Structure formats: C-alpha cells, structure tokens
Amino acid sequence: MKNKFRSLFALFLAIPLNAVSGDSEEIVMTINKTDVTKSEFEYIYNKNSKAVDRKSIYEYVELFVNYKLKVEAAKEAKIHESPSYLKEFSSYKDQLAIPYLRDKDKEQELLMEAYKRGKEEIHASHILIKVAEDGSDSLDAFNKISKIYEEIKSGADFSRLAQDNSDCMSKRNGGDLGFLQVFSTIYEFENVIYNTKIGEISKPFRSKFGYHIVKVHERRKVLNAPRVAYIYISKSEPKYQGIVDSLMLKIKMGANFAELAKKHSMDMVTAVNGGDLGIIDRNSSYPIDFKNHVYSLSKVGDVKLIDNAIGVQIICLTSVGVQPTFQEQKAELLEKIKKSDREKEVGVSYLNALKTKYGFELYEKSLKPFEKIINEKDVMINKLNSPLYEFKGNMYPQSEFYPYLKEQKARYDYAYSKGGQKKKMSDKQFIEKAFDSYLTKLLIAEERLILEQDCTEFKNLIQEYSDGLLLFEISSKEVWDKSSKDTAALSKFYQEHKADYTWDSPKFKGVVIRCKNDSVLNIVEQIIKTTPLDSVVSKVNLLLRKKHEKLVKVDEGVFPQGANKVVDEKIYKIGKYTDDKYPVATVVGSMQSQPQSYLDIKGPVTADYQMYLEQEWIKSLRSKYPVKLNKKVLNTVKSN
C-alpha cells in the first residue's frame, strides 16, 4: 500500500488535506459547494512548497483545485462508500492512531533516561537462579537466591558463589558480564546495574529469566565509536620482543604511529594505510577482549599493547566520536524503545492513566466464575449478570466480556492444537490475559473516538489518507487503467500522433537469447530456423525453459545501441559480450528505421496518453464543478 501512496503523491505533488475547518474561519475558495478555509490552504501551501519549487499562491491554486476536483469526482462515484475503501481506511486509521495513543510523558522520561545512560557503561557480574516458565519453582528459586545473598553479606566470595550456583553461562567467569551499555540487556536488569554504586551488591530481584544478584565493579564514560590504528607483530618472528620494545620506545619518543605501522606492521592489508582499522563500534565483529582494550583508550594518541596467542598488537586511538545531542539522538532512541521491553512501560503507564480517566474498576471476584464455564460449549449468557467492571460511571455485567472470551479461547485452542503454543496456559491465566486484552481494546476504542473529535493533528492526518485513497481509486479508473488496458485507444492515440515518435537512428527489434552452453545454443538456433519471428519466444519457452528453465534467458523488444551487450556485438558490431552464467548467445530480428507500431515505443506513448487523459479529465471536471475563489482572502495567505 505504501507504493500506492508513493505513486499517487509523486503524480499529484503530495497535496494532503490536513486542515481543520471552523465556522468562523475565512474561506479562500469553494469547490462544488465544498468550502476550503484559509488555514487549510495556507497549511498545505507551505507544507508542499518544496515539492512545487515555491510556486506563487495563484500558481499553486491551480494544482490544489485540480486535486480537489478529483476528490469531488471520487465522492460522486461513491468510492468512499465501497466496502474495499471502508476496510482499507479503517485499517489505516488504526495504524495512524498508534503514535497518538501512548503516554507521551512516560515516553519522554524513558528517552531522557536512555540518553543519559548511554553516556556510560557498567562493568558488572551477576548470579542467576532460573525460574521455570510456569513459575512452579519460583519459591525454591527465591529461597536459594536469598541464601546466596546472605552468604555474600557475610563476606563470601561473589565470584566463587557465581561459579558454584549461577544458571548463566557467565558462571565460568565468576559471573562476570563485562561492560554493559543501555539497551544491551533487559530493562529490569539494566535498571539495577545503572542504579547500583561501584563495589556494591544489589538485593535479589526478579526478571523474566529468574532471580538475580548483581555486583558492579566499574563505571566508565562511553567513547563514541573510536577509530584506531594498530601495528601487528607476529610471535613467529624470532626477535619479535625486541621489535615490540623498540616500537614502544619510538612511540614514547613521539614517532609518527602511521609511519611506524607502514614500515613494521606484519598485517600487510592495514599497513599500507598506516595500520588504520577504521571505526570500532560495539557491534563490530572484533573479539570482545579487543574491543574492551580499544574502549579503554580515552585520549587521541593513547597507545596500548595487547599480548595474546595470535601475536602482539599495539593499538593507537586516532579519533573519538562526538557525543550527539539529545535532539540529534532522539529519533534513534525512540526506535530502540519501541523495539525493546521498555515499550511495555509506555503501554502500561498509558493504560493506567486511561483507567483513571474513565473511572475503570474491576470486580475480580466476578472473573472467577468464568473458570467453570470457559470450556463449556453451551452457556446461558443471560445468567452472566453479576457486575464485572465499572466504566465511565456505568456498571457492566459478565455477559459483556463473555463473547470476547469465547472467541479468544477458540482461537487459542486451535493454535495450540496446531502446535502454535509451546505450553498451555491454565484457564485462570488465560481468563486474566483475555480480560487484559479486552480492557485494552475497550480503553483504546474510547480514546480513539476522543482523538478523532478533539485532536486537530490526527483529524488532519486521517483526512489526508482518506482523500489519498479516494484519489488513487478515481485516478486508476479515469487514467491509469485506461492507458494500460485499452490497447485500441492507445494504438489510435499513437497513429494520431505518429509524427511525434520518430527515431534519430535505426534500432534493432527482435529477440535476444542467452544460453548456458553450446548444446543449448544449437537447439535454440534450430528453433529459430523453423519458426516465425513472432513465435520464437513462445516456442523457446515451451521447448527449453519448461525443462531447462535455468539454461536460457530470453529478452524481447527494441534495442538501441548500448542497451544490450549481445545486440551491440552481433548487430551494432561494437564491444564484446561476456557473461559467466550465460556465455553464448544469439539474436533474431531486424533493424528498423522508425517504429512500426505503438508497441515499439510503448513506454513513451503510454506516458503521453496518460497525460492526455489527465488533461481531458480535468477539463471535464472544471466544466462540471463550479470553482469560486475569494481573492481577497487568498492575498492574505502567509508563506513560510
């Protein structure tokens, strides 16, 4: 659908109808008895100024009126009442509402928190005691982590306890997780490490994985995408230690690092560039230990020696990225929030606010009876009359929720029977989850209604999409479908304007067939000898591609010089055709001095015919629908 709008707004200058009307607003024009306010036109004119190269207001009026006339035509054709339009528009409204139906204050709080945390990274260790997915061993896990915590408080070694008890792979390193950054772990865990001081140990806390205890070792400023150069010395070199000592001394004395790398580094690939390794970000494929060493460098020119099994690397920090401002990083952070478990925080905060706003109250005891009837097929819904919840000052019985529960249960059972669910929820768990979903839909639906009534920005946005859909459908009917499907009309248009479609030089019209090998080429050439030109493609496809689809490639059309390497070599006698996949080729056809039919120049003819249909359509619309301009008001329109 995105492509629909791209093609539509590229053709019609992306003019949206975003304005908000008001009884007291000045009217700049009236089109078919539909008033256009000054604020609407002013907004659209300024929004699209770049798309139309800052046309004057009266030049822009012409484009705007044409757009509005087409929308009027779509309404007269009752496209806005068709089931396909209503379904598509409803779907768009749901999608467009999503950014508005969220807790903006909570979102801003999380954005600022992520930005501040992004300035430093935390070196931490942890001990994890896992909890089963159904939580059946939760108490045992809690008792175990509590015992470990008491031992730590009494002076036991954290690293040893992690090795002996942790259910995380980090136990091999005494629970050491290395340096962690914002968004690098689940939000509950991140909150704890960023709120624990250096040298301190957190109290046991719960995450979706189980119970944790965290120890923070170090906090350091994050270097923004450092760039480094290095010198590599292999230990297979008998005198490698002497070479390393000499290089370190020269660096200390102020020698140029890049020049030393060019002369002495045994990594020939990077040596020619002064040992430059480029920017090393946290997601790069370098080993973690190497990245940790890189990020330990703080000032440009700082040097560090790394000695490991593969050799000796002398690394030098050549540049440090600049910390972006909050505004520069805001869009990126928001995307990360929406894709992370933080998004749940925004949703929960928003729903809680809506519960308060609409006076929602649940009578939990009224949910329990559903456990007895959830798997029954025939339920007397009129008996479900106990109060279940209060909403906007009204009381709603159990019967309001039951149809939704029944529908969701049927879907869940079907998905489970097909293997779509790993572990089946208990009836109690399912009822609670279903009611949460029901409540979310209830609250969002109510807020969406308010949004459409009171939010100017949202009303503008859905108006834009509504008119965009209408315009696409009416344009397809009046212009695009006619130009693509009415071949007789297209041919007639070409004949009437034939003089406009001449070639400066002859062109080859025919078929190009590329083959995998000489055997296939021989078969193709036999087909060509015994088959009329207009049947060559179909016969090649029938006899060869059906059995050997990947052995031939067929192209048909008009080929000017430079358009096809096979044609260039065999017809225009320039260049040489080479292709490893299809090394041999042949052509069949002839040179034409001028196009013989619209098919020889279909692209340009179709485009011109579309323009002709567009112009004729607009003429008819202007004669059909009256347009009245209020020049006095138009002259007061402000431009940005």
Image (cartoon, helix red, strand yellow):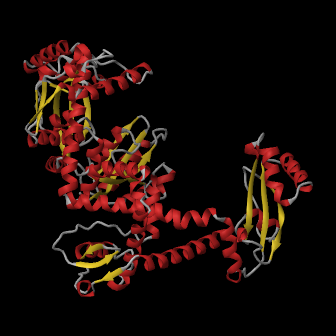
- In the image, taking residue 379 as reference, residue 108 lies left or right, namely left
Q: Hey, which quadrant is residue 291 in on the image?
A: top left
- In the image, taking residue 111 as reference, residue 269 lies left or right, namely right
Q: Hey, which quadrant is residue 285 in on the image?
A: top left
- In the image, taking residue 542 as reference, residue 443 lies left or right, namely left
Q: Residue at x 26, y 22 (%)?
A: 430
Q: Is residue 301 above or below residue 478?
A: above
In the image, residue 187 lies at what x, y percent?
21, 36
> Is any part of residue 118 visible from this angle?
no
Q: Is residue 606 above or below residue 445?
A: below
In the image, residue 191 lies at what x, y percent?
16, 37
Q: Residue at x 27, y 17 (%)?
A: 379
Q: Residue at x 19, y 40 (%)?
A: 443
- In the image, taking residue 261 as reference, residue 545 lies left or right, namely right
In the image, residue 483 lies at what x, y percent?
60, 67
Closer to us: 582 or 162: 582
> Is any part of residue 100 visible from this angle?
yes
Looking at the rendered image, the quarter that the C terminus falls into is bottom left
Q: Is residue 390 above or below residue 457?
A: above
Closer to us: 51 or 623: 623
Q: Hey, which quadrant is residue 178 in on the image?
A: top left
In the image, residue 630 lies at what x, y percent?
27, 84
